[in-house]
Image (cartoon, helix red, strand yellow):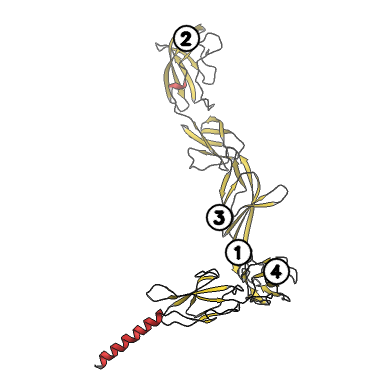
Amino acid sequence: MGVKPTFLLLALWFFCQMHVNAQQCPTLISPLDGDIDVPVDNLIQWTAVDGIIGYLVSLGTTPGGGEIINRRSSGLNNFYQPEVGLPSNTVIYVTISLFLPDAPIRVCPLRVFTTERVTDPPQCTRLFNPQNNETEVRVNTNLQWEYAPGATDYRISVGTSPGNYDMVNNELTGNRLVYGFRDDLELDQEYYVLIVPLNENGAATGCIEESFTTGTPTVSCQDSDFPTISIPDKIALCENEDFGLITAPDRARGYRWIFIDSDGSETIVSETSQLRYEQVGDYRLELYNTLNQFGATIECPVSKNFEVVYSQPPIISNVLITRQNSGLTLDIRTEGAGNFEYSLDGTDSTFQNSPVFMNVEPGERTVYVRDINGCGIAERSIEKELSPQDFPAFFTPNGDGTNDFWQYRQSENSDEIPYEVIHIFDRFGNFLAQIDPKSTGWNGTFNGRQMPASDYWFRAISFTNKEIRGHFTLKR
């Protein structure tokens, strides 16, 4: 056999051996399979297996179970230390699984041992994060301590002065080695911690108090760190709505909307950019950006008080029109308990605070009134298109007080009289009367003589020199 074939055979044998070894399951070496009275803090160790990419460890109190730890990775370490120890006087079932390259996970046969019976209280523990007397600790830190062999629970107390546990007092954590505070700690504050391990036999004695100090802030808010705030002084609660919604017009990292009661007490009613409000009264908006140091959030706040007031949608009760050589003067009269602003010829036009418009060119126009707090808008047409329908179709001058005079008929929504003069003719075109549109009207006579029942014609001339013609009936 040549050298080359021999080398190939050796390589094939080596590969097969590696593959076989990779499939072999480990053997427990600490404790041994079947051991009893195993210490509860015993390191779980097994023989190393070549050619794998990792181990999974399960410890349970039932065959194949994971009640203590379940499929916990130990990487390539052929050992595992249970973080909170093992329960005393208990049969422990060990399952070790192998991560294989390009192959399914292999679950190895069970191994079993029994722990010792713990008959004494545990010994004391100590902090390892943060350590005793450590400084510049982050305010969002969690307390962590070492496992006390035999402990099944821990009692923790925390305070801001020695022996005074004003934050946490004798709180049981369960069989855990970490404690998280509900809120961040204060900056530049010393804290005192007492942790007492315990089990069914009692609590550890003689445990000492430890302490740590959070960091001292060295940053402060600069002008550019503060948000801007531009909420109006008054916000409306419209009388026809059950609630209002407002969104803060400025961007910030955080928001607080606060209701201020009549006795001065304050209640945060929203911590988003939007407020839903259902009652009038005094409020305050607080905006803030944040800086971070030692895990603490330092606020850079601005605030502004504002008032929620009742407001009503506007009602246009009348538009008074005065005609002058320079044009029309419009005086808009409104109803409603609100603050209004006014516009001519479009909601997109500029609104003004005054209800009076001067030097307005004659012609059909529309005036708009809106509540300045957003509770509605009203509109009305003026100088409307003139038509024969502006005049009554008949009248009955019989002295009964009803329809005794014929005259221009004003709109119900306006006191405007757009006509300057009205002429009346009989059906043959003979001129009978000239009447002022502001007068009571024509009474059906000519030169003191009652005119007969018949059709009559009129010609009305507006202030813009527009002429409207039509006819009506005199009934007797």
Type of amino acid at the residue the image marks with label 3: Asp
Mark 4, residue position = 157
What is the x, y in percent for residue 225?
59, 64
Say which label, 4 or 2, has the lower sequence index.
Answer: 4
Q: Does the CB distance between marks 4 and 2 fall below 8 Å?
A: no
Q: Does the CB distance between marks 3 and 2 fall below 8 Å?
A: no
Task: Calculate the distance from the C-alpha at mark 1 to the C-alpha at mark 4.
Answer: 41 Å
Type of amino acid at the residue the image marks with label 4: Ser
Task: Calculate the distance from the C-alpha at mark 3 to the C-alpha at mark 1.
Answer: 16 Å
**Label 1: which secondary element:** helix
- Nearer the observer: mark 3 or 1; the answer is 3
Vertical arrangement, residue 40 with respect to residue 247, above or below: below
Mark 2, residue position = 475
Quarter of the figure with residue 200: bottom right
Task: Calculate the distance from the C-alpha at mark 3 to the C-alpha at mark 2.
Answer: 70 Å
What is the x, y in percent for residue 269?
62, 51
